[in-house]
Amino acid sequence: MMKRKKNLVADNATLIALSNQPEQTYGSMKMHAAPQENMNVFSDGVTRIDFVLVWEDSVNPLKLAESDEEAASSSRDTHRKWRTEFLSRLQTAGLHQETKEVVQGKTKTTFVLLSAPWNILCYYAEEISLRVPLQVVTTPISIWSENVLNKLHIPNIMAQDVPNLPPDYYTCQFRPNKLERFLGHENKDTFFKPTQRHQILYEILARTPYGALKEGEVGIGRLVSEKVFSAAFPLHEGPFEMPTTPLTLDPQSLNMRQILYHYWARWACWRKYQPMDHIREYFGEKIALYFAWLGFYTGWLLPAAVVGLIIFFFGVWLMVTDVPAEELCSSGDAFVMCPLCNICSHWNLSSICYTYKAGLLFDNGGTVFFSIFMSLWAVTFLEYWKRTNSILAHRWDCSEFEDIEERPRPEFTALAPNTVRNPVTGAEEPHFPERQRLRRTLTGNMVIIVMISMVLIFLMAIILYRTILSIIIYRSQNAFFIFSAGRIASLTGSMLNLVVILLLSRLCTYLAKILTQWEMHRTQTKYEDAFILKVFVFQFVNFYSSPVYIAFFKGRFVGYPGNYSTLLGIRNEDCGSSGCLIELAQELLVIMVGKQVISNIQEFIMPKLKGWWQKRKLKAGPSREVDDESDSKMVLGPWETNYRLLVCEGLFDEYLEMVLQFGFITIFVAACPLAPLFALINNWVEVRLDAQKFVCEYRRPVVERAQDIGIWLTILQFISYLAVFSNAFLIAFTSDFLPRLYYRYNEGSMSGYINFTLSVAPNNWTQSQTTCRYRGLRDEKGKHTLDYFHLLAIRLSFVIIFEHVVLLIGRIIDWMVPDIPEEVEIKIKREYYMAKEALAENQSFSKSILDDVQRQNSELRHRVLSQMYQSPCPSGTSPVLEDKPPL
């Protein structure tokens, strides 16, 4: 005994310098104060609940027709058989179970509480390569904005003291025979964090069969999809509401859910830093990385919004001082314009004075600077996010995460026509022929192309709608409406386009989900990537087709008086005399801001409505818990309160909304410098709405590991490059910046610019003595003038120079900003060295602890083998677990 203790001290002195806070234990949420009463335990008050399975039965089933009753009875019998077999295998695998039954009206809800003992946790922790702590990292976590404010001696209003900060550790993969090398191994109850216990339980549930493996009858995922179980979820750690005695409350005694609500999810926290380590500790790396990215993106929107606001105020100043605007407003009857349609009359250019001045808010010299700024902003933002991502991934122990042995999806295992032997593991796995998958993928992509064609058809319909509505307004003989015909048609067309976009978005998302499932992707990662790409390509065309048309096509193919181009017999749309940029700004504001407002209203109202309906459905009758040892209980168990919450719907919709917003503020930012400001305001609201959903409205999701935001980063990089070319063409061909610059260079001033941009209609077209003008650089015969070709050369040169300069600076920024900071690289090397030393075979160990762990794992292996070869299995099944390497 003395020898063992001596070796332990010597080894720890050499390898693991323990923290000077020995009371902290790994996996314990509450480090400094006595925890609140834990309700997430079995009836014995000790055994922790790691997972809950739920199903519902009808107490008094309705009387159906004979054939329907037989089918329903057969289905119930099959489900009962599968449940019994599944729960039996879980019990054989060593999981502790306790059943709770609750009767509410005509429905009996059965809750099966699951808990994993120590030896099961050790066995599967090694199987799924869980990382456990070696040493506390004493380096303080620094926030760059906090450091800058401290140096400037400015109070940091964003800082807050969040209790129970999860410690940071050097970690390595768990090995049961090296248990003494890990921090906190003395306390088996708190050695594994709750989220790690959830991961282990879900791993067991996902790989446990309940029928024939050849038919894919394996895993909790398919059981839930087949309605055998109503739900499967881990429990929240108590209520999110704060205790009723706040005056005497010690913040250290709060549970992690209460901390997240009080210091993160409340609206009062809108200007505070997000407690990222607390979020990761409670929800896992995948969800934490989303909120880290969203917070990082929102913070970077602040300088973009400030610069955009300055450019906007510069446009306001130009409205007052611009020489061409003053010439236009004071021109009177000097510029008589040609009719805008076949039945329209002549009109004076001075009538659009206010519209032309409003266009200067978005079309001015500052637009070029802001476009360059936002293009470089996008590149720099992504580069610094990579750095932040690498810091978080290392701190959260997922920098080297790779899903090497990802399981096939339950749907894939159920529908795959045959099996093949895995050359690595030697196990029989479901297989779908690659040729058939390729044909299905091509067919699915063709359906998306058809949907994209539908979007373009609707776009043409809206274009025709605007033209026809303008004609109808002109025929109304109402002077007020005739004067505003173009603006009314454009604004109502934008609103109609938004409605069509939202409807088509839902339809395409539904089709994409069905098509991606039909394509039979083997793993969840491949399924998600294929689904995201399908939806993004469609949504990209759906949301951006109308702005692209206004920016690059509207007014380009109009012709000139006497030779107008037509579409279905109707003259093509032309930009107003103030240009297309103001119409593009209007379209962006309607689509982007309108979508954000509608989405936020939905995110605020829909979870509450769904939660109300869920609680109403479960309260259809008086509730009583079936328990032989106690009477009816008025207090609901945590499994009941959690079951009444909503199912977490994942992060796809959240990412998609933010990525589309990123496209609006980068691809078309030259048309609307206020777009980053509106995005910033929206994101401040979005963070709180999403936080409230996850903390208050959703059941606790199973932790998923991730080392980055996945394919979304590639999409963001694509958008950032596309934004460079889009802004270059916007400034060159849609904005008046280059024509103004060209005229000032030739004439020395802006006096006479309005007359320079207008051409005289050909004499053979004019039916009266009135000479009318139209926008364009043409002579009296309708031919392009020399100035037009000079400007065309300048426009093309500007595009080439703009994109080369911006992309070159972007490359320089990419080269100057390494993806992984130097201090993180040092920590990675230090951690690798410590893990190598900790897992070395020549270290001395405590023999009694080692023997105890090996004995428990031997018993577990014997139990697993007994389950494989002795448990009754349906015909055609094979063991659930293949041969595993010795522990």
Image: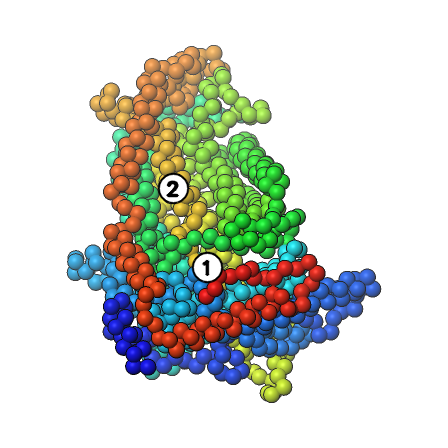
Count of all numbered marks drawn on residues in the image = 2
Query: Going 59% across and 72% down the picture, which residue do you hit?
Result: 92
Three-letter residue code for mark 2: Gln
Instruction: Judge by depth and name the residue closer to the eye, 433 or 838.
Output: 838
Q: Position of residue 345 (x, y in %)?
A: 48, 25
Three-letter residue code for mark 1: Glu
Residue located beneath label 2 in the image:
717
Report which quarter residue 875 is drawn in.
bottom right
In the picture, which quadrant includes the N terminus? bottom left
Q: Position of residue 384 (x, y in %)?
A: 30, 48
Residue 881 visible in the displayed image:
yes
Q: CA distance from mark 2 to mark 1?
A: 24 Å
Query: Going 40% across and 29% down the picture, which residue do you hit?
Result: 577
Graded by Cα atoms within 10 Å as few (under 14), some (14 to 19) or many (20 or more), the crowding at tag 1 reads few
Query: Going 48% across and 61% down the picture, which residue do you hit?
Result: 885
Q: Left or right: 715 with respect to 505?
A: left
Graded by Cα atoms within 10 Å as few (under 14), some (14 to 19) or many (20 or more), the crowding at tag 2 reads some
Residue located beneath label 1 in the image:
704
Work out whether 22 lies above or below 442. below
Instruction: Judge by depth and name the residue closer to the eye, 500 or 169.
Output: 169
Q: Position of residue 751 (x, y in %)?
A: 26, 25
Any mark on residue 145, and which? none
Q: Earlier in the sequence, mark 2 or mark 1?
A: 1
Instruction: Judge by depth and name the residue closer to the eye, 91 or 737.
Output: 91
Query: Going 27% across and 65% down the picture, which residue do you hit?
Result: 137
Q: Position of residue 63 (x, y in %)?
A: 79, 69
Residue 27 visible in the displayed image:
no
Instruction: Judge by depth and name the residue closer to the eye, 154 or 766.
Output: 154
Report which quarter residue 778 is drawn in.
top left
Q: Left or right: 105 with respect to 651?
A: right
